[in-house]
Image (cartoon, rainbow, N blue to C red):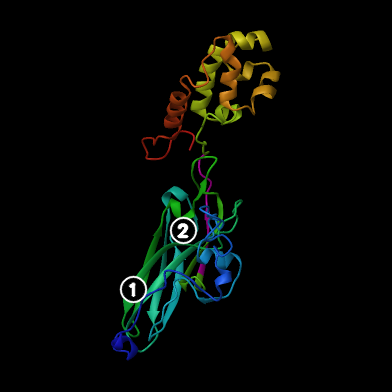
Amino acid sequence: MADVLFGVVNPSGRLAETFPVRLEDTPAYLDFPGDGDIVRYGEGVFVGYRWYDARDLPVAFPFGHGLSYTTFDYRNAHASQTSFAASDGITVAVDVLNTGSRSGSEVVQLYVHDVTATVRRPDRELKGFAKVSLEPGEARTVHIELDRRAFAYWDPKRGDWLVEPGDFDLMLGSSSRDIRAVIAVTALPERPHSPMLTDMSPLEDWLRDEQGRVAVSQLLRSLAPVLGATFGNPTEDPDELDPHFHSYFQTMPIRGVLEFAAPAGGPEPESGLRELMTAVNRASHQPDEDGDQGSNH
């Protein structure tokens, strides 16, 4: 500590949290410690620095902040490509120059901002960082790689990580509040993505999925007696059913379709349903020979 205070050693650490100005500014202030034994995690994805950035709150010391006896300059920031397929990822490079008179280390931080998001996402999300040690006047190029997950968010309806096509800003900085360079890139559309199907997924979701449609055709075979009596044209092809079938069943959970048929000798609601869902999801989401997801991805 004495060496740091007297300048023998140049400190190069970074804060892993945000120091707020007031306790009342913290994201959990109104929710912690909760009522009784119940605590509500109300901040969602806006944890830590993401909360302060989203609310544009001043902070005492930002996430990623650190002190040094020298200074650094960021130059020639660029990405490996401006338009990219999310599955391929992207590499960001920047030249870091020690512009002071002392040796030291800089921690380059890379934040991602989804410009055209259709869901609520943080203003910036730390997705990569790299530490570089430089002598006075020395420069070095820093590379940070971003994979698909760096641009994705969790979609509970699909039960998977999703990358929306559109514009992203790649922000290079010395802290979450000290952004030195911004690179604009565009994520290209991915192949159609099928949701994970459950017993509460509506019939229309099953019909959109290639493997789910096959399963529905098999289901219609077992429901033929009931459908024939009700809609007049029993068939295994969903497109050939009476229009009233679709208006009646399309928003009904698959469990409800099975329950409809159970009195006429169709499968019990629980009979084979879990096996059916497992088989369909495995077939629709398994990797293909190229390492990508199944035919619906």
Binning the other alpha carbons within 10 Å of mark 2 as few (below 14), some (14 to 19) or many (20 upward) gives some
Side of 44 relative to 66 (left or right): right
Q: Quadrant of the N terminus?
A: bottom left
Depth order, front residue of 187/8: 8
What span is colored magenta in the figure? Answer: 182-191
As displayed, is residue 243 above or below residue 131?
above
Residue position for label 1: 132
What numbered label is drawn on residue 81? Answer: 2
Describe the element under mark 1 as helix, strand or loop. strand
Q: Residue 241 — which label?
A: none
> Up-down: is 86 above or below 134?
above
Q: Label 1 near label 2: C-beta < 8 Å?
A: no
Q: Quadrant of residue 265?
A: top right
Amino acid under disc 1: Val
In the rendered view, tell whether residue 70 sits above or below residue 269.
below
Q: Is residue 187 magenta?
A: yes
Residue 284: x, y in percent? 45, 32
Going 46% across and 33% down the picture, which residue do you hit?
Answer: 295
Question: Magenta stretch containing residue 121, yes or no?
Answer: no
As helix, strand or loop, the secondary structure at mark 2 comes to loop
* Image coords of residue 232 (percent x, y): 67, 9
Q: Residues within 10 Å of mark 1 (few under 14, many from 20)?
A: some
Kind of residue at disc 2: Gln
Residue 218, position as x, y percentages in the image: 51, 17
Q: Earlier in the sequence, mark 2 or mark 1?
A: 2
Residue 204 appears at what percent x and percent y? Answer: 60, 28
